[in-house]
Image (cartoon, coloured by chain):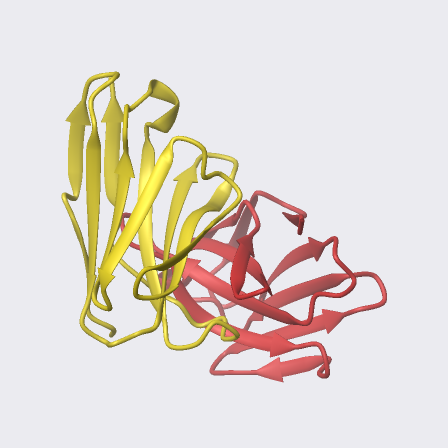
Chain colours: A yellow, B red
Amino acid sequence: DAGITQSPRHKVTETGTPVTLRCHQTENHRYMYWYRQDPGHGLRLIHYSYGVKDTDKGEVSDGYSVSRSKTEDFLLTLESATSSQTSVYFCASGLAGDTGELFFGEGSRLTVL
Amino acid sequence: GESVGLHLPTLSVQEGDNSIINCAYSNSASDYFIWYKQESGKGPQFIIDIRSNMDKRQGQRVTVLLNKTVKHLSLQIAATQPGDSAVYFCAVNNDYKLSFGAGTTVTVRA
């Protein structure tokens, strides 16, 4: 299995506070992704990266920002958390953008009170 | 954008029977399709993929069928086992991004 870890795995925070989720991969994959998973919606893409310092928006990017300063790390930041951002967040990585084989982390459950 | 939908949110199947999970997509230009399995408390895991130049692809106990005419794909699991209980997602790769359907929860009855 690809080595991809997320931290923290669980977090409870209050509305208006900043939150950063970290994704770390040891496979030297070029592509990295952040998804959120909510009941009835499957996985929705927030942001993705196609290289160091190269990022782009997904379908639900409002309220989120990302950074990728090293190949192995991809950070997701909620500048001011809202209750609608309560979700399970998954990071994924892949060797090439035209492949469907992504390797997912175990998820980070975020609760915004 | 791409819309990916599943026909049934849940599927209950007897152990040993075959399972069929269906998925529809909206973009006729889509050319790469993938199935993922997600077990409880874990991240999704790649099962099998198929490109638009194929109609069928087989893996170990799984077969994916693609019907481009009606923009439909299906995942067949042969001789379903208790370990197959999970949520199954179809996904479409467009411009290096995967769009996922909502998922079908498969429950295997003993």
Tell me if residue A31 comes above or below residue A10 in the rendering: below
Q: Position of residue B43 (x, y in %)?
A: 32, 55
Residue at the far right in the pictured view? B69
| Residue B109 seen | no
- The C terminus of chain A: image quadrant: top left
| Residue B20 seen | yes
Image-based side of B29 in relation to B83, left or right: right
Please name the residue shown 47% across and 82% down the image. B60
Q: Position of residue B76 (x, y in %)?
A: 59, 69
Query: B10 or A7, which is in the foreground?
Result: A7
Image-based side of B87 in relation to B52, left or right: left
Location of residue A25 by image quarter: bottom left
Location of residue B99 by image quarter: bottom right
Q: Position of residue A10 (x, y in %)?
A: 16, 37
Image-based side of B94 in relation to A11, left or right: right
- The N terminus of chain A: image quadrant: bottom left
Please name the residue shown 79% across and 69% down the image. B68
Please name the residue shown 14% across and 43% down the image. A8
Query: B48 or B21, which is in the foreground?
Result: B48
Picture mark count: 0
Q: Position of residue B73 (x, y in %)?
A: 69, 65
Please name the residue shown 33% across and 20% down the image. A82
